[in-house]
Amino acid sequence: MFELSHPWVLLLLPLPLIWRRMVPPFRQRQDALRVPFFDQIAEAAGLTVQDGAAIVAHKRRALIGGGLMWALLVLALAGPVRLGPPQEITKATRDVILAIDISGSMDTRDFPGEDGKPVQRLAAVQEVVEAFLADRSGDRVALIVFGTRAYVQAPLTEDLDTVRALLAQTEVGMAGPHTALGDSIGLAINTFEASEIEERLLILLSDGNDTASRMSPVNAAEIARDKGVRMFAIGVGDPDASGEDRLDMALLSNLAQRTGGDAYFAADADALDSIYDEIDTLNPQEVETLSWRPQQDLAHWPLMAALAIGLILLMSLWLRDHGRARA
C-alpha cells in the first residue's frame, strides 16, 4: 500500500502552465540595419517579408520531457512511502513492585501445600507469585527481597521471564535472618522514583514483624502515600507465634491502609492465590496499545526517473548539435 506524506504538494503540478500563460515570453533585442528600400530588395530576391519579432517554438519532445520531469519532482516532494503491515506495541501503564520477605523464618515448613502436606513458606510463595507474574502482561514489574537488609533483585522491567527466573533463584537468608519492613518500603519508593508512570502498586509479603529497619515502617508508608504508591500487604506467617517469628497483621494492616491499600492473611496457597485475584479486582489492569505501520521512503525513485529523463534530453540535444556540426 502506498501513501503520500504531503499530498497537498500535488497542487504545484499545474504551476508551469500557469506560469506560461501569465508571464510574457522572453524578449531579446538584436542590432539591425534599417534599409529604406528593403521591400524592393526582398521582392527582387523572391523573399517573403515577416515580422522582426519571433517566438522560438519548443520541440515536442522537450515539452513532454520537461513536463514529466516536473511531475516526477513534485511527486518526490509529496513524499511517497510504502506502508508495511500494521504493528502493535503494548505500553505499560502500571508499575508493580513485589517486596518478598526472605528472612530466616521463611524457611519454616508449616505452609499447607496443595496435597495438604506442609511446605516451606518461601517455596509456596514462589510458586504462587510465579503464577501471578504469568498474568502481568502489560505491567512493568520489579522484585525486592528483604531480610536484615533490603535489595533490588530485579528493577522495573517488562521482561517478566527474567523476574521469574530471579525469583526462582532466591533463597532464604540471602538478605540476612531478620525482617526490615520499613527499609523494604523505602527501597520500593526509591525504585518507583525512576518511573514516569503514575499508577504504582507495591505488594509486600512477609511472615514476621519488623525487627531490623533503619526507617520506621509507619514513616515509610506515609512517604509512599505522598509519592502515589498504593500498598497491599500479605501475611503468610503464624500470628500465634512469639518473638521475631510472630506475624504482626495489625502492623501490616496499618501500613497498607495508610497508602489506600489493604492487608490480607494467607493461610494456605489457595488463599494466597485468591488474594492476588482480589488485588487484580481492586486494581484492574489497564493496557495502552500503540498501533503504527512501518514506512519505506520512495522519494528517491521519482528523483532518479527525473534525472534519467533529463540526461536523455541532454544527450539528444548533444547528438543533434554534433550531427549539425559534422554536416
Image: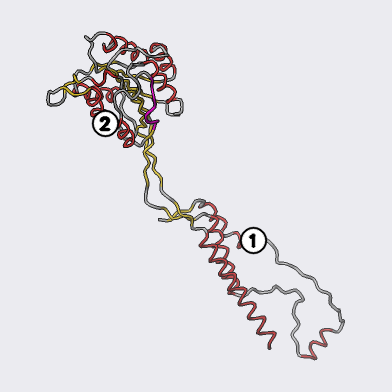
> Marks 2 and 1: which is nearer the front?
2
Q: Is residue 25 above or below residue 322?
A: above
Q: Is residue 23 above or below residue 183?
A: below
Q: Is residue 126 above or below residue 36?
A: above
On residue 130, the disc is 2
- Tell me if 5 is positioned left or right of 135 in this view: right
Q: Nearer the viewer, residue 161 or 254?
A: 161
Q: Main secondary structure of the magenta part?
A: strand
- Give the residue at x 56% y 61%: 73
Horizontal and vertical percent position of residue 46: 76, 90
The image quarter containing residue 18 is bottom right
Q: Nearer the viewer, residue 76 or 287?
A: 287
- Give the residue at x 63% y 80%: 319
Mark 1 residue crowding within 10 angstroms, few (<14) / some (14–19) / many (20+): few
Mark 2 residue crowding within 10 angstroms, few (<14) / some (14–19) / many (20+): some
Q: Nearer the viewer, residue 25 or 128?
A: 128
